[in-house]
Image (spheres, grey):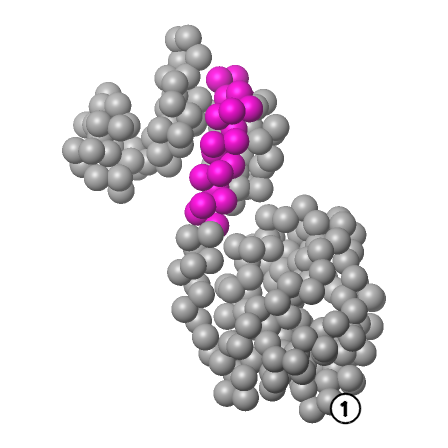
Amino acid sequence: MTNISNSHTPPKEKMLTDGVDSLNTAELISILIGRGPNGKSAVKVAGELLSFAGDNLYNLGQMPPEGMTLIPGIGLARATVLSAAMELGRRRSASERSHVRRISTSKQVFDIFTDRLSDLNHEEFWVLLLKRSNDVLVELKISSGGLSGTVADPKIIFGKALALRASAMVLVHNHPSGNNTPSQSDINLTQNLKEAGKFLDLPILDHIIVAGNRYYSFADSGRL
């Protein structure tokens, strides 16, 4: 609920006197916007931008700068500032999640990668290499592709895993479409890597598909 008693206090002053947590979302965004056009406050412009994003910061974070400029009062320069702020928020969340060093659930893997992959407009393929205790050894990006796919070369994947003496791995890639259902090529790749992992005594514990704020786990679905 909006704090009516401070509604006429400029957001910057309100932040300095009452703390940053006293500002609502529109007021926080208005500080990034700076000034609105003639006759309109920055808070009003921020409110229109939020409304355009469905009052959802996740949607706003996915919006390209050019999309933000559809709101009167937001030019490309201000839109890039807003996009940079959204990216900083993602990186802060990723840093907070990085303390998870032992993997026991698919949700932990999703939490590690969601800020990195959920907003991308292209596919990336990663592997999470694990020690024998399932502690994280390293996170490696294998490939980066287009909207509909990317190449995941088994020779590269197992070559890096063996070189780093990993004991197990989790496969991770994203679907920019937001559809978390595995494609037939996802299924085939998972099975091929699973069989190779058995031969090399380097098991594939899961394959996570990140699709926006949802994910699919091959292990949870009984497909590994």
Residue type for callout 1 = Phe
Magenta segment, which residues? Answer: 71-90
Predominant SS along the magenta part:
helix
Front residue of this view, candidates 4 and 204: 204
Residue 59 relative to residue 172: left or right: left
Provide residue 19's location: percent of width, then percent of height. 21, 39
Residue corresponding to mark 1: 199
User: Residue at left 72%, top 78%?
Assistant: 158
User: Residue at left 55%, top 72%?
Assistant: 138
Whether the magenta-drawn stretch holds residue 79 is answered as yes
Mark 1 surroundings: few (<14), some (14-19) or many (≥20) residues within 10 A: few
Secondary-structure class at tag 1: helix
Provide residue 74's location: percent of width, then percent of height. 50, 21
Tell which residue pokes out farthest to the left in this image.
17
Tell which residue pokes out farthest to the front in this image.
163
In the rendered image, is residue 205 in sight? no
